[in-house]
Amino acid sequence: LREVTLSTQRLRVLPPAVLSNPALESLDLDRNKLRSIAGVSKLCNLKKLILSKNEIVDFPREIQRLVWLEKLELNQNQIRVIPEGIFSHLPRLKHLRLNNNRLGALPRDLAACRGSLQYLNISNNLFRTFPQPVLQLANLQELHVQNNALRQLPKELFQRQSLKMFRANGNPLREPPSEVCAGGIQQILNYF
């Protein structure tokens, strides 16, 4: 088995049978009751890990051992802080969903994913200032920052050629104003 889906199983711990399968490449644990994912580092070939809609408060440090990971979804949990030193071990990460948590900052080492990360969703969090590590993500194509407390967006973000989709509605933006952002990336560029 290379793919396992255990959505809506009311799981509180990872099943030993899953952890004993090192060939596993995709694990979907969406909509469970997980607070931690102890043992997940045994799945050394994992490329896709879905942990959306669980009860995770502490960002799982073990994720840093999943060096082949390309897709990570931790949205709709209760994560407040992501410790430094995790993303520097994930050089292949392309897709990261952290929306609907309680984050107010991102770790500096997220910039280590500059060559790979293409999709980032940090909407519905507690960001008051734009997270600087995002500016170093040179290949970012899609960025979602809706429903935070952002007042200002950095013009450097829009000067890169890679960004194709950007959403920022639901923020008290002053620069550029919300109506400019609603017009899309080209309008934001024109504003700056």
Image: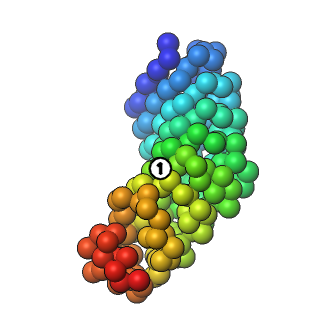
Residue 47 can be seen, yes or no: yes
Q: Residue at x 44, y 57 (%)?
A: 162
Decide: is 28 above or below 123: above
Tell me residue 64's x, y (percent): 69, 40
Tell me residue 106's x, y (percent): 61, 62
Dot 1 crowding, Cα within 10 Å, few <14, some 14–19, many 20+ = many
Apparent side of residue 120 relative to residue 42 in the rendered image (left or right): left
Decide: is 141 above or below 61: below
Residue type pointed to by label 1: Gln
Decide: is 123 above or below 61: below
The residue most toward the right is 85
Residue 189 occupies which quadrant of the picture?
bottom left
In the image, 74 versus 192, the foreground residue is: 192
What residue did someone put label 1 on?
118
Q: Residue at x 55, y 58 (%)?
A: 137
Tell me residue 10's x, y (percent): 46, 31
The residue most toward the bottom is 174
User: How is the model colour-coded?
Assistant: rainbow
In the image, 192 versus 29, the foreground residue is: 192
Q: Residue at x 35, y 65 (%)?
A: 167
* Mark 1 residue element: loop
The C terminus, quarter of image: bottom left
Tell me residue 170's x, y (percent): 34, 72
Apparent side of residue 1 relative to residue 184 in the rendered image (left or right): right
